[in-house]
Amino acid sequence: MAVKSIAERLAQKQREISVSEFFERNKHILGFDSLTRALITSVKEGVENSLDAAEEAGILPDLYVELEKLSRNEYKVIIEDNGPGIIKRVVPKIFGKLLYGSRFHSLRQARGAQGIGISAVVMYAQLTTGRPAKIRTKVKEQDVAYEIELMLDTKKNKPQKVRDDFVVWDKEHGTRFEAIVRGRYVSGKQSVYEYLRATAIVNPHARIEYKSPNGEHVIFERATDELPMPTKEIRPHPYGIELGMLMKMAKYTKNIKMVSFLKTEFERISYRVAREICEKAEIPQDMKPKRLNLEQGRAILKAIKKVKIMSPPTDCLSPIGERLIRKGLKNVLGDLKPEFYCPPVTREASVFAGNPFAVEVGIVYGGDIPADQQVEVLRYANRVPLLYHQGGCALTVGLEQVDWRRYGLEQRGGRGLPFGPAIILVHLASTKVPFTSEAKDAVANIALITEEIKRGLMACGRKLRTHLNKRKKRAKTQEKFEIVQKILPEIATKSAGIIHREVPNLDRTITKIMDVIWIDESVEFSKKRHRVTIDVYNYTPTAKKLTLHAIIPNGNLDMDSVNPKPSEVKDSGKVTWTLKRIPSSKKEEISFTLSGLDSDDYDETELYVSGINPKFIIGAEPLPGDWDIEVREFKRLEVDEAPEADETPAEEVDYDEVDEELEEDSYGEQQESEAY
Amino acid sequence: MAVKSIAERLAQKQREISVSEFFERNKHILGFDSLTRALITSVKEGVENSLDAAEEAGILPDLYVELEKLSRNEYKVIIEDNGPGIIKRVVPKIFGKLLYGSRFHSLRQARGAQGIGISAVVMYAQLTTGRPAKIRTKVKEQDVAYEIELMLDTKKNKPQKVRDDFVVWDKEHGTRFEAIVRGRYVSGKQSVYEYLRATAIVNPHARIEYKSPNGEHVIFERATDELPMPTKEIRPHPYGIELGMLMKMAKYTKNIKMVSFLKTEFERISYRVAREICEKAEIPQDMKPKRLNLEQGRAILKAIKKVKIMSPPTDCLSPIGERLIRKGLKNVLGDLKPEFYCPPVTREASVFAGNPFAVEVGIVYGGDIPADQQVEVLRYANRVPLLYHQGGCALTVGLEQVDWRRYGLEQRGGRGLPFGPAIILVHLASTKVPFTSEAKDAVANIALITEEIKRGLMACGRKLRTHLNKRKKRAKTQEKFEIVQKILPEIATKSAGIIHREVPNLDRTITKIMDVIWIDESVEFSKKRHRVTIDVYNYTPTAKKLTLHAIIPNGNLDMDSVNPKPSEVKDSGKVTWTLKRIPSSKKEEISFTLSGLDSDDYDETELYVSGINPKFIIGAEPLPGDWDIEVREFKRLEVDEAPEADETPAEEVDYDEVDEELEEDSYGEQQESEAY
């Protein structure tokens, strides 16, 4: 009998658990696991919503963030934006209900998509201080703002109005969020300031004003007026669709024919492709999708793999772009006076489990960046900084897989976080960032993603290496040069005086000693134009001819400003000059102007030479692939610095890895993450 | 106008997100982030439910787990138990609805409490293979079993019956779960086998049978018939209660007076205490709780901190216990023939944020355990093995904070995972394990918990060190001994022969050279009894007296078997013999028998000596605190091996740390987890 009573007793205890009660009890899962972090999370959720809203409305975001200390471990959090505002009717649910939102069901790049964030803050506030959250919001065509104080009924997961009202607000449109939470305020790493600073870097189009509890008042000014490219919503891509999902879609579709179902509900499926799939799956094209049975479903998935289908469109993504990353970095890190902003790299978009994603990386080097510690890593997902769980995050893993010793940074054993005066930025943009938890602080360790990050960083690293080499070479020669220039003439004058001869011309001697072609560049910015001057000195004893190539931002070159006339101008932005004859110890000057760029956008030209043995050249790299003998020779010289060639094997290996996974996991499931 | 349309458009897109749709899209959060792991998770959730159910019904668990390969990356998962079975009416929701369960609202130690696990498996199965799960269950007093095939309607988060029926099942009671999932089967670390093996260690009362897809057939036999102590459900403890929670409880309580509300709804609050709280909070004792306003709520929390309140009862916890941990380890790791099972340590229960928790640790050393790699760590929470996220887990963090070099393991810089032939077990038992995500694979980094783990491991480590020292000393002396014993007599006989004298008695010479007191122990098990014999040889040139102390498991000693009669027997299990006079080169024998223990339970006696200079002693430790001069001398001798004394400073520091947090965070929030 004991057993019966048990089975009954257990049955009686079975109960439904409200999602908000669940998270109320597990608030640490949402990023409220410590007082310090709770405060950051509260700000974070508000800021993300504000940025998303403004951008979707095509408005340049203008944010005001304030933390006010009310009592020990109790703070008022204020986030105000100039977004479109929120229609009265949906305000309560947006702030007072977990799992309610506009972006969850749409495949597009957005900061928030879970419908948890901001209402979780409301819940945390009432849990820890018992106080309701206050929201004030105004849409353009209302002359008054709607203001509501609400709480979250965690038993029902429903908003609970405390009071609401219409109030005058001297603001065209926008939303203001206020909550009183238990928290602890800290400065330094993993602080609210740190979070906002990091946010400003990848959102150069946003202006963020911040008042700290200690009364500090920081403003991250807008660095550009360009809004991020608005992202399009896409349908699921047939690759990586799970069988169960297909069955569900077939069951709920409004389409009455299989072909139209496939064409309209999936990305990249034309009628032709749809018919092909049906044929291969041996399913009548006009069959009712609702009739689809499991075996047929499997057949379709198999067929999809056999049919050639374009990879998903990438206009659902809006990467920051190389120019704006650079802008953002300069705008925020300017006071570190870095020696070199490595031209950032934005990788081509690719796909995991049917989700398009693109990786962007940037490196800032030297200046006042501390040299004796591990590099600072700025991790981002969909323009949101990730401050926690650095270790377990795919973005870090990718970075640690690069052998940074090749690119001029210290690294024990060629694995792990490198040491040196550098800040490394990694941004993942995707329609679906696979976060490891609702707190969204780390990305699941998916092979394809770490792979892309690794490639991007290697490309960026090569540019860093080039810069460091150039610098080294220049410095060496400069020294030599100065000595020769100073001492020789003196000796000459002295000795000439002694033997009563006139001072001989030393050019040939000097050039004999130097035996280099010195390429110098200066960039000036005035009247909205960059004036670039390139001097090519021939410090060799003989006349030299060479071909100079400059890579110039497309479309910004004022053609008629170019002097001398280039021998070739490629659409790619490659401009070529053939310098027929530069006499020994003479120089040739090349100049041109660029327009339509901000002062920050341009400070160094990528220069290459061809038609001459690169070993003579200081200040430019040999044009890849050209001047075979010398290039080969050149490579032999530099082999210890592992030129591109050396990296191919590594890359091939990686490819295999990936392919293997594709095969193994049938595209959908490339998510081997035992590692993390 | 653009803006308006936006605000409207955004509003129209706002939608409710079903919790199951949320997790369907974020299945990686539930532990389905890779094919390999998905398979383990599916087994894990089933096994945990089975163990919980059987234990709650007071049944010794008998589990059958089978994986059957159906096609590439497709497996049938079968978990069958002998639990009490499930009442028909609740079956669908338990398996077909997320956030539905019996343990979420009760404060007690249990494996599952979220009400997500098993229904998540059902959801994953239908998502990846489109197949329903099949459940068969029988309660004792039904002669037939109820069988149902169901799916989970993720749009509504509701069970969806495919078919059900009553079937004959030749089983008294129990439940069988079958699901067909996409997964990948691996062996080795982080495999299903690994998970079951780890489960068997901390559940020695369970019998687990396992059939792998490759047809291997493993049985982890039951190592004990003792069920874990059933855990009592407790009410929330006033410490660490959040203001919002208090207000909520006051609002929903059935009590009509403040005092009765406090007394009946919280742990450890008597009427006296309740009245004291009301006084200090200046609240009328008979006030209606529903009337409680925010200020009064705050006042009560303040008052609670000022009033002395017992810490929560710990019968809501059921630690495994030192004896059973040892049993479990031996039962499963036996084939590694470890040289030493460090007596496990179960720490006193303590409290974080109002939740009681207890830490248990054990160390297995030597034998066939690989010596040249990092130690294997077995992490457990409420008897469930944790296989992923080792790095970010509080249990690992605590272990890494111990300076293992003190206890005979290699460790770079005295931090991080040590190297050596050891397996370290860490178990956290709590009414609320703060997992970092729903996948329950890591514990949030809470200072109080890591602290407890550190202490436990240090205590265990000291025992390891003692063992290693004993072994070293013995080995050295043994060697010396054998040489002396062999060579001296030969020399003596030879020389005696030459000078025609009879062979002299060498005892004095030998003892002069040895000058030690050698304590040897042998333990035999026969007729359900352990017979222990302790020989004390005096290999010093003079007669010696000493006091020998043995620590013997309480209540197992057959008093009249003890010979010679002890001079003292403490309840603590400390038995003392005063050995008045052992002549040089003679031995004293001590023997006794223990009953009521299994053969495995006892294999070495903790021996201490006093009343003699410990430097003479081989095979026992000096009784702590005794024989001051010698002990001090002894400490000086061993100072490099950092005896207990050396650890105090470290511990004091930790105390401060903790206290600081108490102060800082007002008991409730000791959750500084920036680290992880």
Image (cartoon, coloured by chain):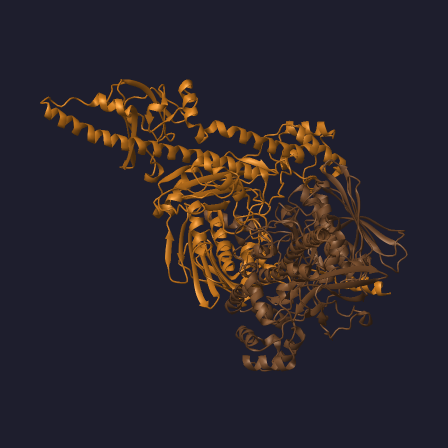
Chain colours: A brown, B orange
Whether residue A407 sits left or right of residue B486 in the image: it is: right
Quadrant housing the N terminus of chain B: bottom right
Give the tally of numbered discs.
0
In this rendering, would B510 be left or right of A336?
left
| Extreme residue toward the left, this view | B500
Asked if one can make out residue B101 in the rendered structure from this viewpoint, the answer is yes
Q: Can residue B579 be seen in this view?
A: no
Quadrant in which residue B159 is drawn:
bottom right
Picture layout, residue A586 above or below residue B569? below
Can you tell which quarter of the image residue A424 is in?
Answer: bottom right
For the point 60% across and 80% down, which residue is it?
A287
Q: Closest to the observer: B534 or A475? A: A475
Q: Looking at the image, is A220 positioned above or below residue A539?
A: above
Side of B116 where B644 appears, left or right: left
Give residue B368's position: percent from left, percent from top: 35, 46
Frontmost residue, A447 versus A554? A554
Q: Where is residue B606 in the image (x, y as percent from the top left)?
A: 37, 30
Residue A240 x, y percent position in the rendering: 58, 68
Farthest residue in the front direction?
Answer: A500
Indicate whether B356 appears above or below A483: above
The correct choice, above or below, for A105 with respect to A4 in the image is below
The one nearer the camera, B480 or B123, is B480
Q: Position of residue B528 (x, y in %)?
A: 29, 37
